[in-house]
Image (cartoon, rainbow, N blue to C red):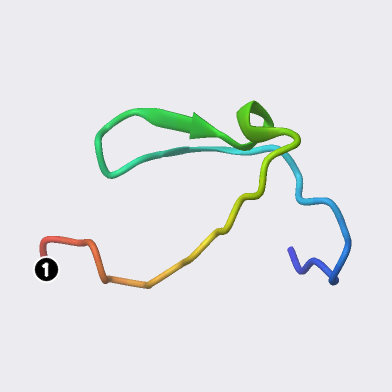
């Protein structure tokens, strides 16, 4: 899925690096920055 600037992201839940699930909607009204680094935090 591609998003355009200004378009709302769909709600999603992902596991954090601490093993806790994080849900985007829990941060409604706050600034959220998503960063994806493929293979950066894997034990490979």
Q: Quadrant of the C terminus?
A: bottom left
Residue 3 placement, left or right of 12: right
Nearer-the-camera pick, 14 or 6: 6
* Number of marks drawn: 1
> Is residue 35 toward the left or the right of residue 24 in the image?
left
Query: Relative to residue 26, is residue 40 depicted above or below?
Result: below
- Residue sitting at the far front: 30
Furthest toward the left, the residue is: 43
- Horizontal arrangement in the rendering, residue 36 relative to residue 29 (left or right): left
Q: Where is residue 27 in the image (x, y as percent from the top left)?
A: 64, 34
- Where residue 10 sits, quadrant-wise, is top right
Above or below — where is 5 with respect to 33? below
Secondary structure under tag 1 reads loop
Q: Where is residue 2 in the image (x, y as percent from the top left)?
A: 76, 69
Which of the pair 1/9 is nearer the observer? Answer: 9
Could you tell me which residue is drawn at 11 percent across and 61 percent down?
43
Among the 4 quarters of the image, the one containing residue 1? bottom right
In this picture, residue 35 sits left or right of residue 43: right
Q: Which residue is drawn at 48% across and 33% down?
A: 22
- Asked where in the image residue 38 lies, by quadrant, the reply is bottom left
As drawn, 8 above or below 25: below
In this rendered view, identify the residue nearer to me: 17 or 28: 28
Which residue carries the number 1 mark? 44
């Amino acid at each position: 899925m591609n998003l355009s600037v200004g378009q709302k992201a769909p709600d999603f839940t992902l596991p954090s690096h601490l093993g806790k699930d994080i849900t985007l909607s829990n941060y409604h009204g706050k600034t959220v920055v998503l960063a994806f680094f493929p293979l950066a935090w894997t034990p490979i």
